């Protein structure tokens, strides 16, 4: 995409002036998506901390995932046996 097109996109999606939009595009190496993301959420590059689960929550999640896998396998075997 041409630099002018990117500038127009940034100006239309933000309330930046032409000078400010040009400055931000240079700051983000002509990546208009990052300029818009920064406008919407200035801290968009910070990683969100993982929520720690309690031992009980983790245990129940593992059991649920295991039972889901078993149920899926059972349904596959059941459908294969009815086809034969």
Image (cartoon, rainbow, N blue to C red):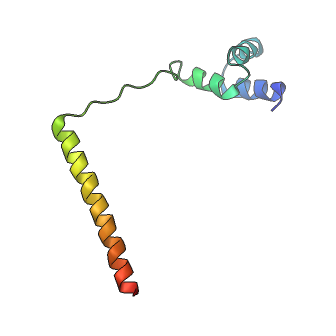
**Percent position of residue 58, x then y:** 22, 40
Q: Quadrant of residue 37?
A: top right
Q: Quadrant of residue 82?
A: bottom left
Q: Nearer the viewer, residue 26 or 56?
A: 56
Asked whether, in this view, residue 28 is left or right of residue 63, the answer is right
Asked whether, in this view, residue 79 is left or right of residue 9, the answer is left
- Count of marks, rendered view: 0
Instruction: Identify the residue at horizontal 29%, vertical 70% (top origin).
Output: 74
Instruction: Identify the residue at horizontal 76%, vertical 11% (top origin).
Output: 19
Q: Residue furthest left?
A: 56
Instruction: Identify the residue at horizontal 69%, vertical 17% (top origin).
Output: 16
**Percent position of residue 76, x then y:** 36, 72
Q: Nearer the viewer, residue 71 or 35?
A: 71
Q: Quadrant of the N terminus?
A: top right
- Position of residue 40 relative to residue 65, above or below, is above
Q: Quadrant of residue 79?
A: bottom left
- Position of residue 5 relative to residue 17, above or below, is below
**Percent position of residue 54, x then y:** 19, 34
Q: Residue furthest bottom?
A: 84
- Position of residue 26 relative to residue 70, above or below, is above
Asked whether, in this view, residue 19 is left or right of residue 62, the answer is right
Q: Quadrant of the C terminus?
A: bottom left
**Percent position of residue 7, x then y:** 77, 23
């Amino acid at each position: 995409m041409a630099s002018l097109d990117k500038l127009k996109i940034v100006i239309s999606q933000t309330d930046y002036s032409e000078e400010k939009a040009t400055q931000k595009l240079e700051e983000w190496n002509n990546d208009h998506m990052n300029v818009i993301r920064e406008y919407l959420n200035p801290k968009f590059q910070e990683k969100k901390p993982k929520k720690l689960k309690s031992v009980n929550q983790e245990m129940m999640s593992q059991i649920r995932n295991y039972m889901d896998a078993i149920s899926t396998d059972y349904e596959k075997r059941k459908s294969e046996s009815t086809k034969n």
